[in-house]
Image: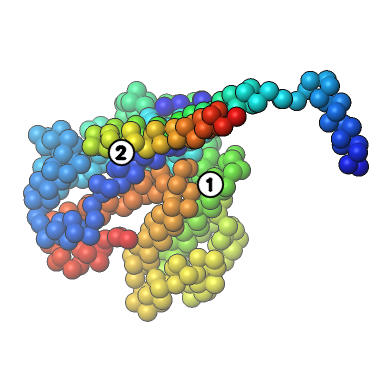
Amino acid sequence: MLEATNELGNVALQAGGTLTDANAAAALAVGLAALGAGYAERGIGSAAVGAMAEDDDLFVNGLILTVLPETIVILALVVVFIV
Amino acid sequence: MSAVGSSNPEYVVARVRARRGSLYGDEEYRKLTRMGPAEIARFMEESSYGADINALGSRHGGVDLIEYALNRNLAGQFDDILDWSEGSLYDLIARYLRKFDAWNVKTVIRGVYTDADQSAIEVDLIRAGEFDDRRIRRLLEADSIDAVVEVLEDTIYGDPLREAHAEYEETGVLVPLENAVDRAFYERLLSGLGNDEPTRQYEAFLKAEVDFRNAANALRLARSGADIDPAAYFIEGGELFTRGSLARLARNLDDLVEYIADSQYGDELGPALRELEEAGSLIAFEHAIDAALLAYSDRLGTIHPVSVTPVISYILAKEREVENIRAIARGKEAGLSADQIESELVIT
């Protein structure tokens, strides 16, 4: 079983089907993290705009909460420096 | 304001939660019960009802002004909610708000039947449903039941009303027409709901409302002892009663009370049922129903914060507020004491 898996890995490597370039993998990681942050901000942003429409004083709170998911991307950027 | 696109519960819930914060609390109600009608109007003018009081202040006065301002505010708020929501959220909210369409249709039919003049009917309408101003205008201009049915031809009330109209012409009573409107509303309310968790909870809430409505009707019939067929007032869709069991239970008050106490609503309605048995106060029972529904929707709203349930919970809370203020104003006009009025309020 193990040998078969190894064999399969070798075949895959030879065919060039897996991601072997570390830089490319890091770029993908950051990209996916940014996608996740964007999706999170969509919901928070629309809620923040809704709250602001009712009460102007909520502008600062809304802005802070909206950009919070941005930290995900910043953490993902760390990966770029490690590889 | 459309049923296309993806739904946007985040936006609507945020706005609705902010508005919920400005609803009256215990403190305000306590103040209101100690005011006269003119003071209540002034108090409302300084809160979120300001624009409505000012718009109607020149035409009406006293308790009428309060009542019309409440209706106008309610309609405006609910129209706003429909305006904001999109996609499946719009569909879910519109289902519930169509009850104001049903109310308007019934009001117009009653107005035409009693030959009331147009402006008298108009002030009693609550423009919170899906009907636009044009249709409402055409409804108001209708001078016969025939014309009303024709205006509603292309709505969900078209077919049932046309069938009921034939019966109305034979008997000359409004009951078949009103039942047709109610039934069309409740049929649409529960058909084709989605299958995710919040929507299932919403469906359970709607079913509870239908059950409570049936229970209240049955209790009223059982107490009045009138010779009316309870099955004619039965609303489909609930889980507690079937047409047959309601007809049987409505004949005997004790059986009915016992049946409700043993049902899944026994916990919420238990204290009210005991009071009903002891003091025979149907009003207290109806208030308990309202309070139980309100508490139930509140709980749903916290379990599923980003779904339709907080919006429905706000809609219910707003309706209760409007009814409470109306009760205070009318009670003051009739000269009731503050304690008596307070017992009429539904506050959670």
Q: Residue at label 2?
A: A61
Q: Residue furthest front?
A: A82
Inspect this view and state whether residue A5 appears.
yes
Number of residues whose C-alpha sits closer than 10 Å to that of mark 2, classed few (under 14), some (14–19) or many (20 or more): few
- Do the residues at pointers 1 and 2 share their chain? no
Identify which residue is drawn at 46% across, 26% down: B2
Picture quadrant of residue A16? top right
Q: What x and y, as percent, mark residue B47?
A: 17, 44
B73 or B103: nearer the eye?
A: B73
Q: What x and y, as percent, mark residue B4?
A: 51, 25
- On the rendered structure, is B162 left or right of B279? right
Q: Residue at label 1?
A: B198
Identify which residue is drawn at 48% across, 48% down: B304
Q: Which structural element holds mark 2?
A: helix
A21 or B87: nearer the eye?
A: A21
Q: Which chain letter goes with mark 2?
A: A
Q: Amino acid at mark 1?
A: Pro
- On the rendered structure, is B119 left or right of B109? left
